[in-house]
Image (tube, rainbow, N blue to C red):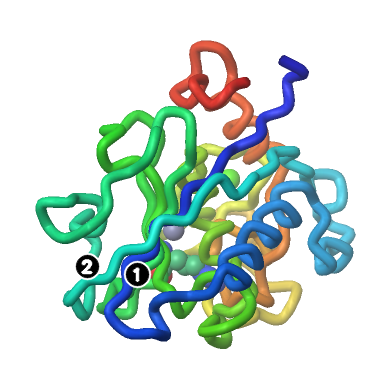
């Protein structure tokens, strides 16, 4: 109505151990991080280098915890093929996926922190899966992925953002105002980190769509915001989230 997108969030918790049955406080801590990161309210936003000050963005989307659904299981890990979303495989089907963002919190395995479904996929599997050890900022949240940025990154994918290196050497993320990155960056790169790609630009390693540690990522760009806005616009793949 007022043009602001406010996204109800359903959190599906699948647990075998007590630790995997994360607390309501840990869940709320993740919602809080999403609200900060997507509204340029994160305390590290001020660390964005001056070089990127004209492109750093307030995406302006808010998240509201709608409900938490918990299910006890015997599975030790769920993998990345959507088993956690299927009742036939012991998981939990999404709740109202065309109007609510479903998050699954479970042990994924294989060193995977999280994964997301891009816009345009099946509603039966729509949403984001995050390993419980990398969800939120308290409880079982584990360094260096203990600042809730796995969900920020995965929700970025859910909103149609690509990896900043375009999943290829000097690849494209289809966003003009992000520099071309040589490849994924890990840890916390020292600024300035130069790309080896055409023009050797300074890489935007602090972008949420890179692969750095949580404390190394703290911005979206205006071009990324434009891609997100297009997804939620009338006629966009996630227009059903408009209210
Ligand atoms: N899909 C990526 C992975 O599992 C997520 C990376 C998130 N990065 C982060 N610093 N939390 O590896
Ligand atoms: Zn990713
Ligand atoms: Ca780019």
Report helix, strand or loop for mark 1.
strand
Task: Pick whichever of labels 2 and 1 is earlier in the sequence.
Answer: 2
**Residue at 59% in and 18% down:** 233
- Identify the mark at residue 106; answer none if there is no mark: 1
Q: Position of residue 28 (x, y in %)?
A: 63, 63
**What residue is shown at x 16% (from left), y 60% (from top)?**
90
Mark number, residue 12? none
Q: Residue at x 83, y 55 (%)?
A: 41
- Check the image and name the residue furthest to the left: 88
Q: Is residue 211 something that shows in the picture?
A: no
Residue neighbourhood size for the residue with mark 2, other residues' Cα within 10 Å, grouped as few (<14), some (14–19), many (≥20): some
Q: Residue at x 73, y 27 (%)?
A: 4
Q: Nearer the viewer, mark 2 or mark 1?
A: 1
Instruction: Find residue 157 and report its horizontal and vertical position in percent.
Output: 47, 47
Residue 178: % across, % down: 64, 48
Q: Nearer the viewer, residue 209 or 194?
A: 209
Residue 1 visible, this orientation: yes
Q: Which residue is mark 2?
A: 79
Quadrant showing the N terminus: top right
Q: Position of residue 109 (x, y in %)?
A: 27, 77
């Amino acid at each position: 109505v007022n043009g602001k997108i406010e996204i109800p969030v359903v959190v599906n918790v699948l647990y075998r151990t007590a630790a995997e049955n994360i607390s309501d406080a840990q869940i709320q801590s993740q919602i809080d991080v999403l609200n900060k990161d997507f509204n340029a309210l994160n305390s590290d936003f001020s660390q964005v280098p001056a070089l990127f000050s004209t492109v750093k963005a307030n995406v302006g989307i808010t998240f509201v915890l709608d409900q938490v659904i918990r299910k006890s299981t015997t599975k030790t890990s769920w993998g990345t093929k959507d088993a956690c979303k299927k009742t036939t495989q012991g998981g939990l089907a999404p709740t109202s996926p065309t109007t609510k963002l479903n998050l699954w919190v479970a042990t994924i395995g294989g060193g995977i922190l999280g994964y997301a479904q891009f816009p345009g996929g099946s509603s039966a599997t729509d949403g984001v899966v995050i390993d419980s050890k990398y969800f939120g900022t308290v409880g079982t949240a584990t360094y260096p992925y203990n600042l809730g940025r796995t969900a920020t990154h995965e929700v970025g994918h859910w909103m149609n953002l690509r990896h900043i290196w375009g999943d290829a050497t000097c690849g494209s993320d289809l966003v003009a105002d992000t520099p071309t990155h040589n490849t994924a960056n890990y840890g916390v790169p020292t600024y300035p980190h130069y790309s080896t790609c055409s023009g050797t630009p300074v890489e935007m390693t602090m972008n949420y769509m890179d692969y750095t540690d949580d404390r190394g990522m703290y911005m979206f760009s205006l071009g990324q915001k434009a891609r997100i806005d297009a997804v939620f616009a009338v006629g966009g793949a996630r227009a059903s989230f408009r209210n």
